[in-house]
Image: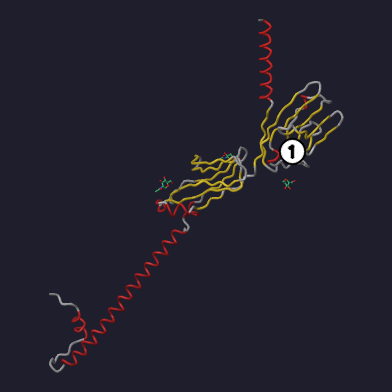
Amino acid sequence: MFYMFVLFWLCWWTLIKVFVALTDEIQSVSVIEGNSVLLPMDVTEIQDDDNILWKFGAGRILIAKINRHKRMFSTFDGPDGRFRDRLKVDQQTGSLIITNITTQHAGDYQLQIIGAKWSSKTFSVSVYGNLPTPNITRDYSQNLSSSSSQQNCSLLCSVVNVGHVTLSWYKGKSLLSSISVSDLSISLSLPLEVEYQDKNSYSCVINNPIRNQTTHLNITQLCHTHPASVSLTALISAAGFLLIVAAVVMCCIRKKCRKTVTAFKTLEEDRTDSSKSQKPKSKADAVYQNVPKKQ
Ligand SMILES: *[C@@H]1O[C@H](CO)[C@@H](O)[C@H](O)[C@H]1NC(C)=O
Ligand SMILES: *[C@@H]1O[C@H](CO)[C@@H](O)[C@H](O)[C@H]1NC(C)=O
Ligand SMILES: *[C@@H]1O[C@H](CO)[C@@H](O)[C@H](O)[C@H]1NC(C)=O
């Protein structure tokens, strides 16, 4: 019974130790694409003649081998050559430097120290793309269809070719809406509706865990320009106005014509009646004759 207990306790202790080793020895590192990153090695932890190995990925591919005592500093390109011309070793400390990093180099880097004492440490490296500046544009498709187009201005904030980012609209310092993407290389856009008279400051922000980029909204510049819908309305109004003018002009011409014809007819009648009536009728009287009589 006692031995069972000891065995159980030993097992439990080993498990705890493994668990602690696993959780304690993973360090996260974030880096922007194109930059360099240094995975540090603490010299105080090692003996001079320890072998230091750097390995990459789940396959534990050997990418660097260091023995400071023998002055041996080797780096390897990896089977697919992805580390070619990108690895350096700090000869004092044995730290690994990855230059001009790309998303291909994201993953786990394991440091193994082999000597009198064995130990290992893992760096989990995340590589983030460069952040583009968000682009704010007027969303005319929304304006034409929505009933709010009279007071509201529809906008879109968009970015192209991004991965692992969040795009957000802020009103002052408070978050209004956001959208996140974890895929690589896609386009994102986020709508916003503001009133033309809105005096608040709005901004569109793109961020990843390392950086952010902000574009401020200029309502006056974007919303107070003449949109397609306005020019369409103007066009329709102009056409309508022209039609009315044309109708009025036609009406006038026809009326004038009729007047002349009537006047001519009356004059003829006058000429024939002139012998009977001594008083010649004026042109104006003739015109009035043509108007239907009020009963
Ligand atoms: C960095 O890597 C990219 C992609 O592999 C390459 O096109 C570029 O020339 C490199 N830049 C430098 C400064 O080495
Ligand atoms: C106009 O936009 C505001 C937000 O700026 C919104 O609260 C309001 O409901 C919108 N009006 C209409 C008619 O959609
Ligand atoms: C953007 O980054 C700066 C620091 O670079 C930080 O002060 C600011 O709060 C960040 N803004 C947002 C909206 O995350």
Quadrant where the C terminus is found in the figure: bottom left
Say above or below: 237 vs 167: below
| Relative depth, front residue between 144 and 42 | 144
136 sits left or right of 16 in the view = left
Mark 1, secondary structure of its residue = strand
Residue that appears at 46% across and 56% down = 224
Find residue 279 and report its image quarter.
Answer: bottom left
Which residue in the protein does label 1 denote?
Answer: 98
- Residue 103, image x and y in percent? 68, 41
| Relative depth, front residue between 228 and 186 | 186
Name the colouring of the figure: secondary structure
Find residue 258 and report its image quarter.
Answer: bottom left
Say above or below: 173 vs 283: above
Question: In the current view of this chain or complex, which residue is farthest to the bottom?
Answer: 275
Residue that appears at 22% across and 87% down = 265
| Relative depth, front residue between 82 and 197 | 82
Amino acid tagged 1 = Ile
228 sits left or right of 94 in the view = left
- Residue 74, image x and y in percent? 82, 35
Residue that appears at 57% across and 41% down = 181
User: Count of labels shown?
Assistant: 1
**Image quarter for ligand 3:** top right
Question: In the current view of this chain or complex, which residue is farthest to the top?
Answer: 1
Find residue 213 and report its image quarter.
Answer: top right
- Residue 215, image x and y in percent? 56, 47
